[in-house]
Amino acid sequence: MAKNDKGSKRANTDAKKTDKIDEHVGKRVRQRRLLLNVSQEELAGLLGLTFQQIQKYERGVNRIGAGRLYRIARHLGVPVEYFYEGLESTGSSAKVADLAHPDVVKFAQMREELAPDEVACIFQIGASLLKVKNKKKEKA
């Protein structure tokens, strides 16, 4: 701890600032929570927090401590490493935001009710659409 002008100890405020890693982890918490259809209120209740605190974590406004991140991971059924996946790659925050898009969340929830061959069919349709789109780009 550093000393202020009056000689009393105070915490280093730089250590409390959040950064891109905190934002990434928060987005991954939100992504997983939405995929499981868990509300902020429900997750907050499991952790003994307010939903506002969960909001701050998910936006990267507040840093999630190691112990709390461990408990969040357990409640959301993933290893702690899950929240750091994709961190090294360029533009990972944008990709994580895309995964939290309402359409992606809806598909993930619907997927649970579909047979594996039905899911494969949907992916084949998506792949075909991308091929057509790419061919149009090449011609333009």
Image: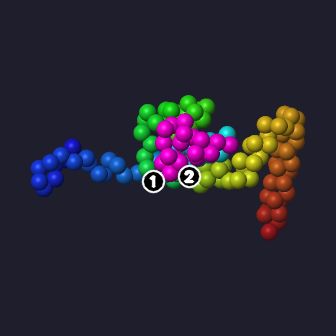
Nearer to me, 71 or 87: 71
Name the residue: 80% across, 54% down.
130
137 left or right of 39?
right
Q: Nearer the viewer, mark 2 or mark 1?
A: 1
Q: How many marks?
A: 2
Name the residue: 61% across, 31% down.
77
Name the residue: 31% across, 51% down.
14
Residue type (three-letter) at the residue carrying disc 1? Val
Residue range in magenta is 37-54
Residue picked out by circle 2 = 93
Q: Position of residue 126 (x, y in %)?
A: 82, 50
Residue picked out by circle 1 = 61
Q: Position of residue 118 (x, y in %)?
A: 88, 39
10 left or right of 127?
left
Is residue 62 positioned above or below 76 on the image?
below
Residue type (three-letter) at the residue carrying disc 2? Ser
Name the residue: 67% across, 40% down.
36
Q: Quadrant of the N terminus?
A: top left
